[in-house]
Image (tube, coloured by chain):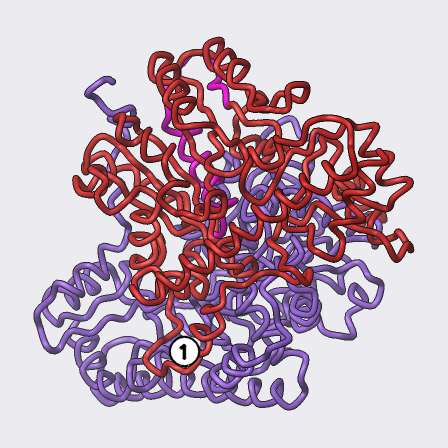
Chain colours: A purple, B red
Amino acid sequence: MAALSLFLDVPLMREADRLLDAYQEDPSPDKVYLDHWDCQTETGKVWVCPTVRQILLQIANDPTLDHEYLPVLGFPEFTRAATELALGRESRAVIENRAGGVHTVGGTGAVRIGAEFLQRWYNRSSPSPIAVYIALPQWDSLRCIFQDAGFTEIRPYHYWDTVRLAVAIDDFLEVLESAPDCSIVLLHAPEETGLTPKQWEEVARVMRRKRLFPFFDVPAQGLASGDLDRDAWALRHFVAQGFELFCAQSFSKTFGLYNERVGNLIVVVRDNETLLGICSQLQKLVMGMWYTPANLGARVIATVLNNPALLSKWKQSLQTLAERIMLIREKLKEKLRILGTPGCWEHLTAQSGTRSFTGLLPSQVAFLERHKHIYLLGNGQVSVCSINSHNLDYVAQGINEA
Amino acid sequence: MAALSLFLDVPLMREADRLLDAYQEDPSPDKVYLDHWDCQTETGKVWVCPTVRQILLQIANDPTLDHEYLPVLGFPEFTRAATELALGRESRAVIENRAGGVHTVGGTGAVRIGAEFLQRWYNRSSPSPIAVYIALPQWDSLRCIFQDAGFTEIRPYHYWDTVRLAVAIDDFLEVLESAPDCSIVLLHAPEETGLTPKQWEEVARVMRRKRLFPFFDVPAQGLASGDLDRDAWALRHFVAQGFELFCAQSFSKTFGLYNERVGNLIVVVRDNETLLGICSQLQKLVMGMWYTPANLGARVIATVLNNPALLSKWKQSLQTLAERIMLIREKLKEKLRILGTPGCWEHLTAQSGTRSFTGLLPSQVAFLERHKHIYLLGNGQVSVCSINSHNLDYVAQGINEA
């Protein structure tokens, strides 16, 4: 046997998480980390939907449940309820049986399965590679998924104007106008973007004219406005306009069940026959990737979504969480006003959802990290949930000094 | 908006499960299905490891457990214990820190992640596509995984002589001898094949000379002989011989936890530095596929593997299950002897594990289905667990008539 490894040329990939590493190594007692991907509570713990523990106990105690494989496309009560939650029960696509869901391993799994399908079946007659557009804040996490699925033309776009500190709708529309016809565009809604319905209507108009394919990414329906229906406005508008589309839906944040990996790939197409063909091909792709999805998380979520009492409790807790996030935004803005921090901070409350652009420049972000032990992304984005009453004053003071 | 779907040309993929459909549609009260993929108990229920329910309750009751994401490579206590279970605690590869595990979504996920890695990093200087060899009984389930990962040269081999009703070791060795150097060979151990240690040594010798890459597929360690160490003999022999290899390990059958999707991709290489490089690349691939694996199943299994009392209980229950399978083989052979069925049925007990070649010809399989409502694969393979004291006589009688 040769003494050298067959894999000598495999380089060590450094993890991208420099920020977390730097935070963890910082010995300062004042240090604050503002880039959590999960929702933190006021005490800095991970938020979990209050009914979840009770349902987990019920499931563990239920002698009628077995541990047989789920169907390849997942837990049907879950996919149906999740799809209706996004599109609305009254959606024509639902009523006409031309919308369906595939239960996936988290939101990532939903994007990946969708990308694999599109890579094989979307616009196959195109002589040049299909372009995929991904918004900058999602660029790092989503680009590699489309790359791994075989797409070669992946392009970033931005919807946030770092000078005007507002949605950069004109730039966004310009990107869409100049995109090759039939490109795929990842639309991130409802979180963060804060596009108004009017702006979404404009986006839909351009996308229709250019025959661009909408692939929605819905990581936390309900956490932007606190209202599930309002947060689904953009998606439902596209469906109502007759678009065929995909939507990757995640329940990690809205149930606080990160580690059970529950996602749903929603497919909306012209008619039921097309839907059945697509689902049969998605089934083949799932069988080659994870065979069938994991059960527990989807069972918990299906229990909530299909029980009116639990559903109403969950909606209430989502609203409370969303209100807490909005309150933090208000408090931070107010604090900065009192400190007399230069600049206008209206954009803090004009945005919604768990993540927020602060408008801080890379040099200011570096100052915060070096001198105040406050860690956030170079583009100035923070997780609003990472701020609580214990660190709010310190963070505001830090921003003021920066 | 055009009235035609963008996906008009997506054909409906018929599910491959013709057999199950035919069985389910058969109105006969005598019907018997002999192709279950899960382990059935004497009463035709799915077998679950007896300690699982108790651990599930413990987990649901434990207030210290949160639901944060697992690390990308999974639950460390699980991967370490699972890897040691396969390789042995005393394995030099383990002691020298050059064996590692990646917690995956089931055995399928382990094969897929391994295949994706090999497609990118294995033998990159080869001018022609790398050939992958898959044994015929696993052909249907594994071929699509390697295809989806981008391999184009996938070839079947057989290790079962349908005339002599015995392991076709000469044919197997001949395939290995004639394979292009550095091909990848899927080795299915310990189940079914029933290769003796001497035959495995021969396989390893040829594979070393031809520099073939071993990718073990271990779906149910412990269920062939009832002894975990004995079932790991072939894998450990390859490791001891200094091979670098992959091994996809599944716990679905051995814990009866099919729907929580627990797998582990074991990587054994020359040294720790190479292992770290490979794991960092695997991490990148996982992030683009499911981001991090699901928690529950791995937590249950880690609890058992890391607790000596629970481990010994589990080993006992595995042994009982394996003995039951062996007893069914004995009983069926005896029954056929009493009925005076033509032919020798020694091969029923010469094989081990949950699945078995019966030696029935396609015409006999068709006869059983048409006239006796007994459903099995065209190659004569059955799931031994699907036979129990209620249907044993009927099945034996059917085989006798066929």
Q: Is residue A122 visible?
A: no
Q: Quadrant of residue B349?
A: top right
Give above or below for B322 relative to B134: below
Which residue lies at the image location 82% right of the left edge and 49% below the top edge? B23
Q: Which residue is mark 1?
A: B58
Q: Quadrant location of the C terminus of chain B? A: top right
Rendering coords of residue A357 (x, y %): 36, 68
**Name of the residue lying farthest toward the top:** B178
Rendering coords of residue A71 (x, y %): 67, 56
The chain under label 1 reads B
The amino acid type found where label 1 is placed reads Gln
The crowd level at tag 1 (other Cα within 10 Å; few <14, some 14-19, many 20+) is: some
Residue B129 on the magenta span: yes
Give above or below for B20 relative to A197: above
Decide which of A354, B88 is in the foreground and name it.
B88
Q: Quadrant of residue A399?
A: bottom left
Residue A294 on the magenta span: no
Q: Which residues are magenta?
A: B105-132
Which residue lies at the image location 58% right of the left edge and 82% below the top edge? A227
